[in-house]
Image (spheres, rainbow, N blue to C red):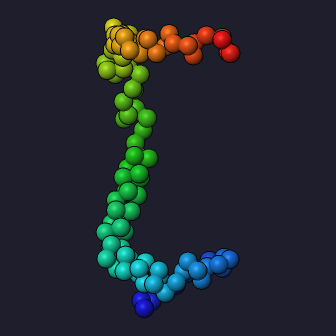
Amino acid sequence: MADVGVEGPGVERAAEVLTPEALEFVADLQTRFGGHRDALLHARAARRAGIAARSPEDFPDFLTLPAYELMVEGPRRRTPVPPATRELAAGPCTGAAGA
């Protein structure tokens, strides 16, 4: 078995979950994908640091973008309700309870 350890306080019934097979599986995943995972985590941290270093003026004001203005102030179209749906809406369920 690979050299895998579990850190932290013990938990009830851990032996049922942390079997030698399960630990071997985790070790295999780390061996196969650990380097790629570490690179992705590093890239994420670098991207977050870059975003955090920017000032608010560097970000677009979404409330003034043309697409937002068109959505809020532009024409609104609604698709007509199909006749079958209108018939369902006017069915017996729309009356008073028990009627």
Residue 34 spot, x, y in % from top left: 36, 73
Q: What residue appears at the point 55 percent right and 77 percent down from the top-left corner?
A: 17
Q: What residue appears at the point 49 percent right and 87 percent down from the top-left corner?
A: 20
Residue 88 spot, x, y in % from top left: 46, 15
Q: How many marks?
A: 0
Q: What residue appears at the point 43 percent right and 35 percent down from the top-left corner?
A: 56
Residue 84 spot, x, y in % from top left: 38, 15
Q: Residue furthest top?
A: 75
Q: Nearer the viewer, residue 79 or 54?
A: 79
Q: Is residue 53 left or right of residue 66?
A: right
Q: Is residue 2 left or right of residue 16?
A: left
Is residue 69 shown to the viewer in this render? no
Residue 29 spot, x, y in % from top left: 37, 76
Q: Nearer the viewer, residue 94 or 51?
A: 94
Instruction: Tell me: residue 21, above or below residue 72.
Output: below
Instruction: Tell me: residue 48, above or below residue 96.
Output: below
Q: Residue furthest bottom?
A: 1
Instruction: Tell me: residue 52, above or below residue 3.
Output: above
Q: Nearer the viewer, residue 46 or 8?
A: 8
Q: Residue furthest front?
A: 99
Quarter of the view holding residue 46: bottom left
Q: Give the quarter of the figure containing the C terminus.
A: top right
Q: What residue appears at the point 34 percent right and 59 percent down from the top-left corner?
A: 43
Q: Give the quarter of the figure containing the N terminus.
A: bottom left
Instruction: Tell me: residue 64, above or below residue 40.
Output: above
Is residue 38 shown to the viewer in this render? yes
